[in-house]
């Protein structure tokens, strides 16, 4: 039963007219506002519409995501730099027993990075670019080597002048501490250094 008013809109739930050919099933998509017939004469509602969210090129199944770079030399250089700075920091705080293994680790990592062969180049006469791991390895070699020298020097002094250091530790007065240097005949620089550290 008709309402007697023809609005010209197509009812999507109405059955097809008699004698109309069968059409394949198509999913419904949101339609844009009607803008009139297309240049070829077909109405907008018969033309398949693209999805409203568009196409994302990063979801192309034919182009997988590139793998994350995992360069062992870069990781080794980072470990060397961290170990070198940690060794130097522990030396500044007087933790020589911890600075020694950290400095050894930094030097070992740095040498391993510097010994890694560079990538071959096609032109042997072209200048080779500096690898990004080399500056980090050189910094680790400098800080780790400095911490290693300081910690080894402290260990050597403690071993060679063990009796003198024990005498100063057991001294109650400054006069008794000064007499330890005459008793054990230690170098002047060591006695001066011990007095400075005692005054501080």
Image: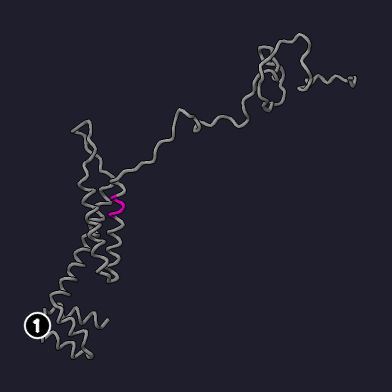
Left or right of 26 on screen, residue 181: left
Front residue of 117/61: it is 61
Look at 30% across and 62% down and name the residue there: 86
* Image spot of residue 45 (x, y percent): 70, 20
Q: Quadrant of residue 64?
A: top left
* Image spot of residue 121 (x, y percent): 23, 34
Relative height, residue 179 to residue 23 (above, below):
below
Q: Quadrant of residue 26?
A: top right
Q: Which residues are magenta?
A: 76-80
Relative height, residue 72 to residue 3 (above, below):
below
In magenta stretch: residue 4: no
- Label 1, residues with CA under 10 Å away: few <14, some 14-19, many ≥20: few
The image quadrant where one finds the N terminus is top right
* Image spot of residue 21 (x, y percent): 71, 10
Front residue of 167/146: it is 167
Look at 64% across and 21% down and name the residue there: 48
Please, what is the dominant secondary structure of the magenta stretch?
A: helix
Most extreme residue toward the top, as rendered?
A: 19
Left or right of 143 on screen, residue 41: right
Please give the count of numbered marks on the rendered protein. 1
Residue that mark 1 sits on? 185
* Image spot of residue 160 (x, y percent): 12, 75
Look at 76% across and 22% down and name the residue there: 12
Front residue of 196/118: it is 118
Q: How is the image coloured?
A: one colour
The image quadrant where one finds the C terminus is bottom left
Q: Secondary structure at mark 1?
A: loop
Look at 43% across and 35% down and name the residue there: 65
């Amino acid at each position: 039963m008709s309402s007697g008013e023809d609005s010209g809109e197509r009812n999507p739930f109405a059955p097809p007219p008699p004698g109309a050919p069968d059409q394949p099933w198509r999913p419904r998509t949101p339609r844009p506002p009607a803008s009139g017939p297309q240049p070829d004469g077909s109405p907008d509602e018969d033309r398949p519409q693209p999805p409203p969210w568009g196409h994302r090129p990063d979801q192309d199944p034919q182009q997988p995501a590139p793998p994350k770079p995992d360069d062992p030399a870069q990781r080794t250089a980072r470990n060397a730099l961290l170990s070198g700075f940690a060794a130097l920091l522990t030396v500044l705080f007087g933790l020589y027993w911890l600075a020694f293994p950290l400095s050894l680790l930094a030097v070992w990592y740095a040498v391993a990075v510097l010994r890694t062969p560079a990538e071959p180049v096609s032109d042997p006469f072209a200048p080779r670019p500096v690898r990004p791991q080399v500056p980090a390895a050189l910094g680790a070699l400098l800080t780790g080597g400095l911490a290693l020298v300081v910690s080894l020097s402290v260990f050597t002094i403690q071993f060679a002048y063990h009796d003198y250091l024990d005498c100063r530790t057991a001294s109650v007065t400054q006069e008794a501490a000064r007499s330890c240097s005459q008793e054990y005949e230690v170098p002047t620089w060591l006695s001066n250094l011990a007095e400075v550290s005692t005054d501080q």
